[in-house]
Structures are given as structure tokens and as C-alpha cells.
Amino acid sequence: MALQNTSRAHDLSPSAGVRQIGNFIAGAFVPAASGRRFEKRSPLDNRVISSIAEAGHAEVDAAVGAARAALDGEWGRMSTEQRVSLLYAVADEITRRFEDFVEAEMADTGQPRHVMTNAFIPRGAANFKVFADVIKNVPTEAFQMATPDGTGALNYALRVPKGVVGVVCPWNAPFMLMTWKVGPALACGNTVVVKPSEETPNTATLLGEVMNAVGMPKGVYNVIHGFGPNSAGEFLTRHPGVNAITFTGETRTGAAIMKAASEGMRDVSFELGGKNAGLVFADCDFDAAVDGIFRSSFLNSGQVCLGTERVYVERPLFERFVAALKAKAEAVRFGRPDDPSANYGPLISHEHRAKVLSYYKKAVEEGATVVTGGGVPQMPQDLAEGAWVEPTIWIGLPDTAAVVKEEIFGPCCHIRPFDEEAEAVTLANATDYGLATTIWTTNLARAHRVAARIDVGIAWVNSWFLRDLRTAFGGARQSGIGREGGVHSLEFYTELRNVCVKL
Ligand SMILES: NC(=O)c1ccc[n+]([C@@H]2O[C@H](COP(=O)([O-])OP(=O)(O)OC[C@H]3O[C@@H](n4cnc5c(N)ncnc54)[C@H](O)[C@@H]3O)[C@@H](O)[C@H]2O)c1
Ligand SMILES: O=C/C=C/C=C(\O)C(=O)O
């Protein structure tokens, strides 16, 4: 049975067949022993595009076992230099198969080609290269100490891999977010078992082909497919053979995984939800701020954890800003990822659309004025069954409204005026989350002051989602635990072992 079609590009046309996807364990694409499969539907037209083997306990055991065996085998004996050159080969092979990754991700998410080619897929290759460089260049500490006999002792630290790392991933930027964790985990000498989102099985599976093509030892990279509770996600995170768990997804899921990780005292790294604020001051570069907030609220159909669903605009600019953002939101052109006349995609699924639309309804019930959107766009017949929603802007909601408090994860934002800098900071911080903010002002003193006062992991000034992969990335409050990026990833993916040598 062909479990992964290696030769054909992903056909996005309505007449394309159903793709058969298997788990990737110890270098082979394998079905589920139970015979269980689940379907993935296209967000564009709700057509079934993939049939995926659902991993049960047997496959999770096999994947964790393969990952353990790889640690004890050739991979575990490799020098850092050997690992680094393999990771470079992975990055090069991703670049060679760039188009396959672009098409695989477009098929799963329905997002436009330019989002894939400019942002999400190049980050896959970069995520392997940057951590290869980090691990090659980061020194470890050493301390000389005095001893009573006068001969002294020397302490030095070794960085050793944690072991088998469970990597549980979301659907919104699947390849970028998965490699953001697999890259550093492998750079540090761990092995991984990846559980992609049930909505986006494609690119993690394709990466299995890349691993085989570059000669990655079997079992270093494994993929198991399935759902969360009582399925592959829970089986993996509860598995006693997993030494650490890195997760990106909803805060509520993070809480469930944290409970699972407490059995056996496994370490966790969490990148979770957000309800991020954008702050626009009257002294901003107006056009840049409108463009920036348009991206932060609506890129990827608003399905970006760093996105801004709360926008606070200094009062003198308020009406002009709302009008300019409305014009941009109304200019999006819905359509297929490869349609050159289109530039805007659907939500990931009907299930997610139902959640987003429930907030669109709730906004009205809570007293919002709908500036634009609020519903489902009229689509041509071939796309009528897709998970489309209109980019939506509200004004006039109280600060206590659910729509202003809860993460919606859709193409929408509420815009509210403010009068004072201190008020803007208070409003931005009025949330249980703390992932990111974006601040628009030409007053640099104000920019530094405000960035220091907003309780988030990432504060962007006159920019948004501008990423230097050496920097710390993660959330404060309920938006996460720990930081990844650059040397910070090493803190999670390795144990420091101190060696004390009496001289
Ligand atoms: N902070 C960040 O960097 C970041 C980045 C991207 C997405 N996100 C967040 O992710 C969410 C959207 O992604 P999603 O809907 O896929 O998230 P999700 O939490 O529903 O699912 C994420 C993954 O967890 C698995 N899962 C679900 N329940 C589980 C359980 N009990 N045990 C083990 N695994 C389980 C799912 O199958 C999926 O693979 C949003 O909240 C968004 O803010 C955060
Ligand atoms: O949707 C969330 C985007 C997260 C981005 C990253 O994890 C990253 O840029 O490394």
C-alpha cells in the first residue's frame, strides 16, 4: 500500500484523488495495526483530500521505541559536527523540495501561495540551519575552585540530550512550528516523536522523506498521526519513554499535557494562546501602522498566535485608522492558494469556522458596532463548501466583553480609542495571556517605555512577526512556559551535567 506518494506534487484541483498518509516510524511509512484511518478535508471546498492512518498505542510504543533505539545507536555516538552536517543536509533537501512543501501545506491549510513561499516554508529550512549553528558555537561554562589541600578542582559543564522528545503541534503554521522544535531538539542530540495536528498531517510526513533522503539514522525522526484526547496526542504525552514534551497549541490543551507530563516528572516547553494587543499612537507613521495592524490581525486568516485581536488607537487617529483598516479588510480577494487573482484563504476547518462565527454572533449580542464583515462571504460554486469567513472589525465593545477577553483565532479585531499612554498600557495588560504586542509610534522614548511595561514575551515596535531566530521566543502568563530560540532552546533540549575534577 502506498502510504506516502513521493513522486506526485500535491494536486489542489477538485478532481485530485485522496492521498494516503502513514505514520513514519524508524524510517518507514507504516499503517496502523488497528486499521483505523481518519479523513482530512480541504478547507477550500470540504472535499476529502487525505486518508490518514491513526496511530494507536502500538504505533506510539513503536515510535518511542525507535527513538530510544536511535539514541543508543549511531545517532547517539555522532559528534556535534556530524549532527550539524546532517542538519544542514536536511535544510538543503527542504530547499530542494521547496515546491512539494509549499503544495503540501497549501493543500492542508488553504492559505495563499505567497504566505507559504515568503514566510512559512523558508522558515522550515532556517529552523534546522540556525540551531545547527547555535550548537556548534555555544561554549559551556567552567569554574576553577580552591580545595583545602591546595591542589584545587576544575568544574566544567557538559550539555547532554534530554533523550526522546515528544513534539505536539498545532495546525496554523504546521511546518514552521514543527521544525522550530524538531530543529533544536535534533541539534542537541535528542530524538523526536512528532504528533502533528490532525488537520495538517502533510508536511511532517513529507519531512520523513527528507530525513531518509539525507541518510538520517532511522528512528531519529518519527511521526505519529491522530487526535488529542484518547488518541495519539495523549498516548504520546503519557508515554513513560518520553523524556520531555514540547507543545504549541491552546492553553487548555497545555494544561492537560502538563498533567500528563507530571507523571514521571517530564519537563515541558509550552507556546500557548494569546489575546494580543496592538497599540497605535497618534505620532505613528500612519500608513505603516495600518499595514502592520492589517497583517497582525488578518495574516493567515487571523490564525497566528502572535496576531492582534485587540487594537488600541490614540483618539485623534481613531476614526481615520478604523476607516483605513476597513478599506484594507474589504479589499481582500478570497480564492484558491494558486489563483493569482486571489490573496486570501479560508479558516482551517468547518469546526473552527463555527467557533469563529459564534464569536461574530456574540460580538453583536455584546453590543459591538460591526465596521466590516461579520459573516461568510459569497463564494463561487466550486468553493461554496469551504470554511470561508469575512475579515471582521468591531468597535464599541466594553472592556469586559468576551470578544475582547477570549482568544478567537480568526480574522477579526476590536478597535478601541485611548487618551493616555498609561491607559493604553493598562488596557494592553488587561488579559490573562501575555504572548506578544505590537507598538506603533515614532517617539522612540515612548516605544522603549511602553515595550518594557507590557507583560508579554515578545514586544514588536513598528513591526510585527519580524523574527531573528537567535532571540528568546515564548509567552508570559497563560501564553506559555519557557523560552525557545537561539541558546534558549538549549536550556530545554539539553541537561547540563557538571563534571567536577579534583586536581
Ligand atoms: N504561542 C505560540 O507560539 C503559538 C503558536 C501557534 C499556535 N498557538 C496556539 O495554538 C492554538 C491553535 O492550534 P490548535 O487548535 O491546533 O491547538 P490545540 O491545542 O487544539 O491542538 C494542538 C495539538 O495538540 C493535540 N492535542 C489536543 N489535545 C491533546 C491532549 N489532551 N493531549 C495531547 N495532545 C493533545 C492536537 O491533536 C494537536 O496536535 C491557538 O490557541 C494558538 O494561539 C500558539
Ligand atoms: O502562530 C504562531 C506563530 C509562531 C511563530 C513562531 O513560533 C516562530 O516564529 O518561531
Image (cartoon, rainbow, N blue to C red):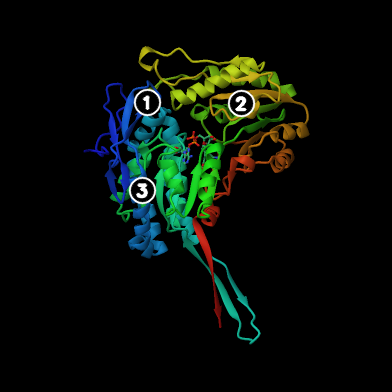
Along the viewing direction, whichever of 415 and 88 lies nearer the viewer = 415
Amino acid type at mark 2: Val
Residue 296, image quadrant: top right
Decide: is 121 above or below 45.
Answer: below
Name the residue carrying label 3. Answer: 222
Q: Give the residue displayed 26% in from the left and 37% down from the top.
A: 5
Amino acid type at mark 1: Ser
Name the residue carrying label 1. Answer: 42
SS under mark 3:
strand
Q: Is residue 228 left or right of residue 223?
A: right
Marks 1,3: beta carbons within 8 A: no
Which quadrant holds the N terminus? top left
Mark 2 beta carbon near ligand 2 (under 8 Å): no
Decide: is 250 above or below 352.
Answer: below
Query: Which callout, 2 or 1, points at the residue further toward the start of the chain?
Result: 1
Circle nearer the viewer, 3 or 2: 3
Decide: is 232 above or below 423.
Answer: below
Residue 155, image quadrant: bottom right
Name the residue carrying label 2. Answer: 290
Q: Residue 484 in the image: x percent, y percent?
A: 54, 49
Along the viewing direction, whichever of 129 and 13 lies nearer the viewer = 13
Q: Residue 287 in the image: x percent, y percent?
A: 62, 26
Which quadrant holds the C terminus? bottom right
